[in-house]
Amino acid sequence: MKTVLITGCSSGIGEACARHFAAQGWSVAATMRNPAAAAHLKDIPNIKLLALDVTDKASIAKAVADALAAFGQIDALVNNAGYGLFGPFELASDELIERQFKTNLFGLFDVTRAVLPTMREQRSGVIVNISSIGGLTTFPLNSLYHATKYAVVGFSESLNFELAPFGVRVKVVAPGGVATDFGGRSLALTFSGDGQPYADAIAKVVAAFRARQSARSTSEYLAECIYAAATDGTRKTLYVAGEDAVALVAARKTMTDEQYLAFTEQRMGLA
Ligand SMILES: NC(=O)c1ccc[n+]([C@@H]2O[C@H](COP(=O)([O-])OP(=O)(O)OC[C@H]3O[C@@H](n4cnc5c(N)ncnc54)[C@H](OP(=O)(O)O)[C@@H]3O)[C@@H](O)[C@H]2O)c1
């Protein structure tokens, strides 16, 4: 039976992934910050809940060791844990910037490094990193989130070159909007109050994002995309997931930079 270790399984895409891999007959090390709160996954036979905070190296080492003790191998890693930091760059504190990078990027690096020796020794494995449409195109007032998610795309593609000789592949999934807790519980703000002197732009962009919520994919659909990326056996690297994301990436390719800025300002209510 193949084994997958997934980060951020308490809700959303991570939880759906845990369920989907388990339904396909995989053993699942479903990791999350607080497994005690995951009663909804507890009774699924081939899912093992493990504590893992991607910003805590000791918890990463323990979760990987526990997964190996339970299942003997790790065939796939899904680096899913992450959250959004929204708001003007100028107003972000050092602490907020560091937390965004520690979670979305350095945490992903640390989990990957913890799993790589096993995959390298097995001479097989696949790593699926969850970036975002925000790792391929940009929106207003998301600069720090984009910085992490663009980094995930470049990191993932490059890693293939050094891991191919060991039979390890690295994939990156870039979802568009997905109906999860991402815009609620998992959204941090760079600003307090109404965010002066950027209050007008913030109000407009928040309204534009809210108006677009109906175009979101489900987390179950994302789980299918991630499973396909992990199991298709190809060297395809980038998987754009969701009709909105596919359309936006295609549209961006037809535009000059000036056209993209004007198009996005118009969509986001800034022009
Ligand atoms: N939803 C979207 O529209 C969308 C679009 C593109 C990309 N994504 C990406 O998809 C991934 C999953 O997000 P989601 O949409 O499924 O949102 P979600 O339901 O809010 O899930 C986010 C998960 O990340 C976990 N997490 C946050 N910080 C963590 C840490 N330090 N250590 C371990 N886990 C941590 C959360 O755990 P807690 O329960 O402990 O907070 C939660 O399990 C993220 O990387 C996000 O950037 C989402």
Image (spheres, rainbow, N blue to C red):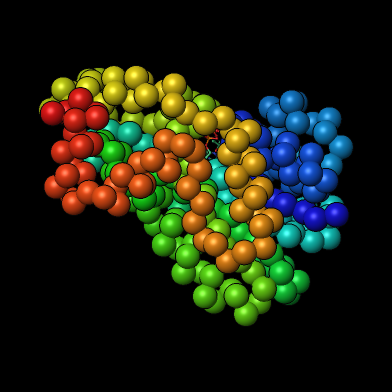
- Residue that sits furthest to the bottom in the current view: 165
Where residue 262 appears, as percent x and y from the top left, is: 16, 38
Residue at (52, 61) in percent of width and height: 237
Q: Identify which residue, 270 or 73, lies in the foreground.
A: 270
Q: Is residue 205 above or below residue 232?
A: above
Q: Quadrant of residue 127?
A: bottom right
Where residue 4 appears, as percent x and y from the top left, is: 72, 52
Where residue 245 appears, as percent x and y from the top left, is: 42, 40
Q: Is residue 130 above or below residue 271?
A: below
Where residue 209 appears, as percent x and y from the top left, is: 34, 25
Instruction: Work out whether residue 48 can be spotted.
Output: no
- Look at the image and tell me in which quarter the C terminus lies: top left
| Position of residue 260 in the picture relative to residue 60 (left or right) | left
| Position of residue 217 in the picture relative to residue 21 (left or right) | left
Residue at (62, 80) in percent of width and height: 165
Instruction: Work out whether residue 154 can be spotted.
Output: yes
Residue at (85, 54) in percent of width and height: 1
Q: Identify which residue, 63 or 148, lies in the foreground.
A: 148
Q: Is residue 111 above or below residue 219?
A: below
Q: Identify which residue, 101 or 128, lies in the foreground.
A: 128
Residue at (38, 40) in percent of width and height: 247
| Position of residue 206 in the picture relative to residue 242 (left or right) | left
